[in-house]
Image (cartoon, rainbow, N blue to C red):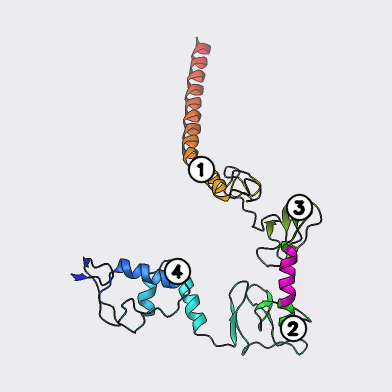
């Protein structure tokens, strides 16, 4: 039994490899999780007087599956040089050293081998044919400013949540379909359309947790989330009761049907 250097509780603790100090599993898990959340790849020892780093295997053993994926991504990213960057859409890594464009193509024009997204290696933005990176960034800033302006009761344009291109609506409803990636999204809030079932509602439902934030109490977000959350929780609690009631009524109807059939059959035999 040793005393944890963080929580000071007496526990059976395996000492850290870097400094042989005692830190319990619970404290170590909280520490490495917090470091991964802020994008750390090399995680230093939680003991302040130790200048070492925690081993990769030790870190991974104290993370969830989702956190392990993030940690490995940050680790890989930290080991890359300036000639390798991740795709801005799917994070697939591409190296300029292995990239061999055609003679007619620009050396910074990259097409991701995983998602086929075409992007600029230099400024890490969607490919801007005929525009310098500086001019593209300036134009993109102007575009975002223009798109966010409200005219005639609606935004000038809305950005697709997947491929990030701006789409302008001239007429019709809020349900938009991106012409580039076929993503269905809401023009008013820019969120993807989600639809699990009629029971829980969809993006057009006022009281659904998946509903558009501008359709119901847009000026009172906390009240809207409270009401929608309460409705969803009520449905989750009521659903088993409804299912059980349907099963019971179905069984009862079956039993009554069998009794009536038996009674009718006995009357016919008489």
Res. 266 in view: yes
Query: Which mark is first along the chain, 3 or 4?
Result: 4
Q: Is residue 176 above or below residue 233?
A: below
In the rendered structure, the answer to whether residue 204 lies left or right of residue 256 reads right
Q: Nearer the viewer, residue 224 or 3?
A: 224
Q: Which residues are magenta?
A: 138-147
Q: Is residue 76 above or below residue 11?
A: below
Q: Nearer the viewer, mark 1 or mark 4?
A: 1
- Within 10 Å of disc 3 (Cα), the crowding (few <14, some 14-19, many 20+) is few
Q: Which mark is residue 153?
A: 3
Query: Which mark is first along the chain, 2 or 3?
Result: 2
Q: Which residue is mark 1?
A: 230
Q: CA distance from mark 4 to mark 3?
A: 42 Å
In the rendered structure, the answer to whether residue 237 lies left or right of residue 16 reads right
Q: Nearer the viewer, mark 1 or mark 3?
A: 3
What residue lies at 74% left-to-right and 80% top-to-bottom? 135
* Magenta segment includes 141: yes
Q: Nearer the viewer, mark 4 or mark 3?
A: 3
Q: CA distance from mark 1 to mark 4?
A: 30 Å
Q: Which residue is mark 2?
A: 132
**Residue 112 sits in which quadrant?**
bottom right
User: Chief secondary structure of the magenta span?
Assistant: helix
Q: Is residue 266 above or below residue 99?
A: above
- Within 10 Å of disc 4 (Cα), the crowding (few <14, some 14-19, many 20+) is some
Q: Which residue is mark 4?
A: 67
Q: x%, y% of residue 80?
A: 53, 85
């Amino acid at each position: 039994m040793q005393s944890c250097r963080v929580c000071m509780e007496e526990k059976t603790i395996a000492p850290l490899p870097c400094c042989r100090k005692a830190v319990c599993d619970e404290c170590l898990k909280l520490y490495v999780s917090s470091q991964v959340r802020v994008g750390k790849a090399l995680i230093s020892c939680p003991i302040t007087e130790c200048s070492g780093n925690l081993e990769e295997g030790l870190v991974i053993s104290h993370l969830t599956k989702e956190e392990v994926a993030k940690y490995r991504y940050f680790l890989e990213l930290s080991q890359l040089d300036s000639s390798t960057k991740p795709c801005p859409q799917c994070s697939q890594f591409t190296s300029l050293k292995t990239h061999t464009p055609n003679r007619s193509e620009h050396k910074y024009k990259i097409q991701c081998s995983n998602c086929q997204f075409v992007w600029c290696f230099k400024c890490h933005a969607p490919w801007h044919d005929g525009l310098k990176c500086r001019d593209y960034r300036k134009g993109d800033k102007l575009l975002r400013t223009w798109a966010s302006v409200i005219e005639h009761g609606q935004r000038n344009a809305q950005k697709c949540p997947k491929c990030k291109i701006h789409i302008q609506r001239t007429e019709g409803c809020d349900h938009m379909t991106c012409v580039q990636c076929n993503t269905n999204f809401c023009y008013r809030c820019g969120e993807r359309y989600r639809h699990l079932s009629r029971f829980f509602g969809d993006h057009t439902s006022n009281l659904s947790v998946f509903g558009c934030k501008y359709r119901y109490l847009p000026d009172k977000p906390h009240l809207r989330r409270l009401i929608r959350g309460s409705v969803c929780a009520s449905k989750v609690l009521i659903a088993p009761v409804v299912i059980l009631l349907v099963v019971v009524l179905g069984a009862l109807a079956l039993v009554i049907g069998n009794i009536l059939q038996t009674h009718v059959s006995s009357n016919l035999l008489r």
